[in-house]
Amino acid sequence: MRRALSLARRGAGQTSPNPPVGAVLVKDSVELGAGWHKGAGQPHAEVEALNDAVRRYGEGAARGATMYVTLEPCSTHGRTGPCTTALIRSGIKRVVIGAIDPNPTHGGKAESLLLDAGIDVMEGIEESACQSVIRAFTKVQRSGLPWVMVKSAFGMDGRVTRPPSEGQWLSGGGSRKEVHALRGEVDAILTSGKTVRSDNPRLTIRGTSVAAEKEQPLRVVLTSRENGVPKDSHILTDDFRDRTLIYRSRRIECVLRDLVSDHGVLSVMIEAGGNLVGQFLDEGWVDEVVFYLAPLITGGEVPAVGGEGAVDLERRIQMGSCSFNRIGNDVRVRATILRSGNFGDA
């Protein structure tokens, strides 16, 4: 199952509106085939693993084998056929499932179909890790809202103040490289018109840390101005300008729901100034934060996180699972927001 999980993670940020899933086919302790879901409309992970086994060992290779899959196999016909049907036809004898599908159309239905076909079923193996891989998909299924991650870099005083003559970066080169990998995990990057006007960011994935198949994330701009985004800005003039969406004077909830319903978005990363970041946190839209702490003090009046803030200590925002990593001279903190109904850990 851990091998299947590593495969599932290869599809992160590429499968929306579907979840990332990995699968491994094993017989007599030998891996016959493996695969992961590479994108909507393409074969699901189980079919990829079955096809891989045929390529390696020929027709009928799966007969009597065990399929390990991170997410419950689908049982209805969508853009591809039901995976339960493919598994039954393959002649396998056992299916080991990590997490139950949060999609109510499929959730909990695979077990009875497989058992009726004489296939043994085991569920809940590495369940927490499997749920974490699909946390964005789960949130969309249960709430109609995407998984929202905030990314920010700031000095040790929590400020991002810098002279206009200096570049926009506070963190080091290693941290900036990792940000491109983070962008590869999400379907959309959201910022403010103010950030576009002041920094003219590209908000694209660059470098070799992300699979070549990964489509550039949508660039989403929130602005209250009629001409809040300069016409010569990178996001309106570069090769990916058709991936830019501008929302004027729209409520955050409406924008998030529109991204899910109209654009198939599962996950969004906020790359913006402290005011917008603070508003997202104040209103409770954020699920995860990734902060890069640089070894410097800027002082000044520009905070990394603004907003109204907590009215008292009881209602301050608390972190769930946290990870800390040293990247050059920077420290990266990645953590989920602790609240009831969390949809998975980072």
Image: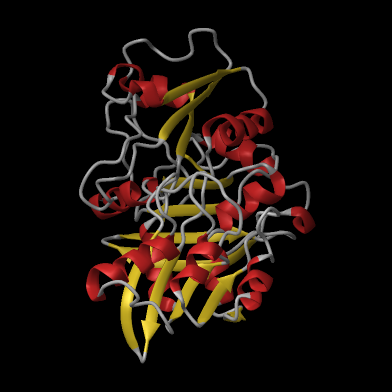
Question: In the figure, 132 relative to 58: above or below?
Answer: above
| Residue at the outermost top position | 226
Residue 345 screen position, x and y as percent? 57, 64
Structure colour scheme: secondary structure
**Left or right of residue 304, residue 251 in this image:** right
For the question of whether residue 303 can be seen, the reply is: yes
Location of the N terminus (image quadrant): bottom left
Q: Residue at x 30, y 67 (%)?
A: 52
Between 38 and 33, the residue placed more toward the observer is 33
Between 255 and 38, the residue placed more toward the observer is 38
Query: How many labels sit on residues?
Result: 0
**Left or right of residue 22, residue 200 in this image:** left
Q: Residue at x 51, y 54 (%)?
A: 19
Q: Residue at x 44, y 48 (%)?
A: 15
Q: Residue at x 54, y 7 (%)?
A: 226
Between 272 and 169, the residue placed more toward the observer is 272
Residue 280 screen position, x and y as percent? 62, 39
Picture quarter containing residue 152? top left
Question: In the figure, 339 relative to 89: above or below?
Answer: above
Residue 131 screen position, x and y as percent? 57, 66
Question: In the figure, 6 relative to 278: above or below?
Answer: below
Picture quarter containing residue 34? bottom left
Between 230 and 2, the residue placed more toward the observer is 2
Residue 273 screen position, x and y as percent? 49, 34
**Left or right of residue 235, residue 304 in this image:** right
For the question of whether residue 156 can be seen, the reply is: no
